Image (tube, rainbow, N blue to C red):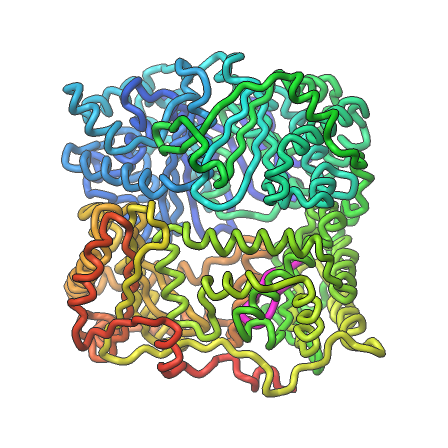
Amino acid sequence: MATATAADGEILKARTDEREYRKIVLKNSLQVLLISDPETDKCAASMNVSVGSFSDPEGLEGLAHFLEHMLFYASEKFPEENGLFKFVTEHGGSSNAYTAIENTNYHFNVHTDSFDEALDRFAQFFITPLMSADATMREIMAVDSEHQKNLLSDSRRMRQLQKHLSREDHPYHKFGSGNMDTLHVQPETKGLDIRRELIKFYDEHYSANIMNLVVYGKENLDKTQGLVEELFQDIRNTDKSIPRFPGQPCTLDHLQVLVKAVPTRQGHELTVSWPVTPSIHHYEEAPCKYISRLIGHEGEGSLFHAFKILGWATRLHAGETGWTMEYSFFNVTIALTDAGHEHMQDILGLLFRHINLVQQSGISQWIFDELSAICEAEFHYQAKTQPMSYAINISSKMTMYPTKHWLVGSSLPWKFNPASVEKVLNELSPKNVRIFWASYKFEGQTDKVEPWYNTAYSLEKITKFTIQEWVQSAPEVKLQLPTPNVYIPTDFSLKDVKDKDIFPVLLRKTTFSRLWYKPDTKFLRPKAYIKMDFNCPLALSSPDAVVLSNIFVRLLEDYLNEYAYYAHIAGLRYGLSLSDNGFELYLVGFNHKLRILLEAIIQKMAKFEVKPDRFSVIKETVTKLYKNKKFRKPYEQAMSYCSMVLQDHSWPWTEKLDALSCLEAQDLANFVPMLLSRTFVECYIAGNVEKSEAESMVQHIEDVLFNDPKPICRPLLPSQFLTSRVVELGTGVKYLYHQEGSNPNDENSALVHYIQVHQDEFSMNIKLQLFKLVAKQATFHQLRTVEQLGYVTSLSQRNYSGVYGLQFLIQSSVKGPGHIDSRVESLVKDLESKLFKMSDEEFKSNVTALIDMKLEKPKNLNEESWFYWGEIQRGTLKFNRKDAEVAALRELKKAELIDYFNEYIKVDAPKKKSLSICVYGNQHLKEMASDKEKTRLPLVEIEDIVGFRKSQPLYGSLKGCSQLKL
């Protein structure tokens, strides 16, 4: 185990971690962890304050969350609204914050050259925050918009229901996020000045001695220490104690209950919850991890495997959740099928029977040793992550763990203590249980409503004797503990790579496949990354084909699960999904046993057969997924409609649902041989893999699928290679699509305002990217901060199969999409003025920021591979894209950027091609007809998306058959 130095001892770190660490305590008692990483492109900081929503005063729910918004707004030294956000955005970074139950975390990242000033701005929030009266109402609206966005989230609704059914005098019972009612209407009714209450809360709770800061820098530790001492020593220390909330949230009244709740979406979910001893007090022994490994296992003989055989469940998760130092819950959450919903009592009976099996089997040393070995491998060979994420992760742990374990946390169980595991196991008893059963079938059968999210529910008491009856009456199935895991890696050696290729090389090509290879020469971890795209022309040819292809890949995963689950928990993950060309396989993780898993997957693919019982379960799952599309958030609906307008070979979910309803197992049995009959496999293999190994893997796939005497697959004919093509919008025309939101209960509306600009070309790309950088912060400030149109507000660059454009995205409960669209047009006019007034110095600063962003090195193998795979998938193969675009940026003149804006983006640009997707929530539905009536040339209304798409010209494909010509 490697170590770093702290004033009071060593800090344990991963043996592959070359960063330096130092703990310091400032004279104001602020505890700080300094990190020095000479390799980093970005610096970051995270301040964790040990006060959260549990400290909200009675009747001022959401005050801690509101303070998070207001504190991060401006300071006396830097009074500009959203000044930090503006500064870091303009220098390649980002900033954010979150409020949890017992802490509030503020964080940012930025390019290294701008770190000192950003850190100064950040520190001032905690020294002299402005919390101006002008901003108060705007930020209350922002908090309310955030709440409105989450009102129909089933996960939030169920979590609040669990909190609601607890002791009213315990802070667990509270509503933490706040809304307009709790932060404005009710305080005003009581004669309270909310800003005064906010400042009072800040004065009472924010003190340097209960804050923890992580600073991730490029400079050496001494230099960073000097900077931190200078900037943060003036945070006041009023010697507060960290708020503690002793006692359990649940009394006997809240245990032995069965709660039936109505979700917003179709489906059934069962959550079985027990209050347990928090594992944090025994984190080196990992009692809850041990138990969750056994109850949540998915291999043969497991509880989930039994549910699968019976056709009762599609997912099971077990683990500790919602814990503090004082209390914790252990939850088992099961996604039920329709049949499982009808057998809830049997499912609970089998769950308690399985818990009894674990208890009677005793606590096994070998199971703990496996858990320990897996955790040790994961920790010591963990990939680097983004500095901000890393800083947040550590700062949020610093009050819970001794300094020695700040980096380790609970991730390295090493003390085998059967007693601590048995204690938690004994708490998973019928007398201690809370059962939450959510199903759309309970609609109209409930008699209570949770007040904050209006979730309908009913509650009944159950006795331990009832549960014992369920245990006895449950069907006889074979339950057993897991067998030893053959996938645990033991060889962590690094390959001796002779060729230090900077970019992927085309290592092998045949009529069946093409192999791109990129050895790991940067990250030096014993891991690999594999992507394989099975190009099957039939897969996307119709709604029926898409649905059948979807069921095929889901069934394939389903058949592999009992076996591949062992690989998953040993740090080797795989997945199958539909792609633009057919279906895609990925494998990521330790390379030692990766080949074994790959061969198992290919073998199962080759021997695929349709099992009618599993087909029925997967069909039911996919049916619910399609039906639940109508409950997507309005901004998700708008983005989906935009993709539908632009992307050829995309089918409406309603058509896929219609096709699915008629399909049977035999249809899939007939389809799969035809699907696979013509295939081309595009492969990318990267990481700790030798050339010969990579070639051998692909050769094995060809031998199994193509080279058999009766081959499953034959090569594609030249005319069969699929290309992803995009609709070319008309020049000088604005297209509009108006649609009612598909969820009648959602008040939110949404707008996507899309400007299509050009096909992939370096000199054009950089102008679009630079404009986006210049405009991003101004967009957020005007539309969200000033006009308060909605919490979801963004400006992004879109890339549809190599066709670039800009996307303004806003979701709002206060204004309809027609009004928002006009505000975007107005903003674009303001941006024109901003661009013309930009000084040469500002222009150079933005160019430098964009160059820094492009030169930012990938942090790990996954990031690097994601970029290269994107180039392969799109057929652009511009592996040197970043360097080429940087070279173009260095030559760019301000006048060229302005000319680009005038030609393609400004409101009356001669080559402008734009599309506005307007989705109307129930609050604004009455505006839709009048908005449509305003559509006059050069505005064009799209009535039928598929019909429109078929009538439009398409951009030529960047991929094209020539890329695959052999």
For the record, the magenta segment spans 577-588
* Residue in the picture at 30% in, 63% down: 917
x then y, percent, for residue 529 = 65, 59
- Quarter of the image with the C terminus in it: bottom right
Percent position of residue 372, x then y? 73, 34
Left or right of 242: which side holds 356? Answer: right
In the displayed structure, does residue 858 sit left or right of residue 467? left
In depth, the one of 472 and 371 nearer the eye is 472
* Rendering quarter of residue 172: top left
**Along the horizontal axis of the image, is 435 left or right of 799?**
right
In this rendering, position of residue 945 left or right of residue 923: right
Residue 280 visible in the picture: no
* In the image, residue 334 above or below residue 592: above
Q: Position of residue 729 (x, y in %)?
A: 32, 77
Residue 201, compared with residue 545, is above or below; it is above
Report the predominant secondary structure element of the magenta stretch. strand
657 falls in the magenta region: no
| Most foreground residue, 596 or 165 | 165
The image quadrant of residue 666 is: bottom right
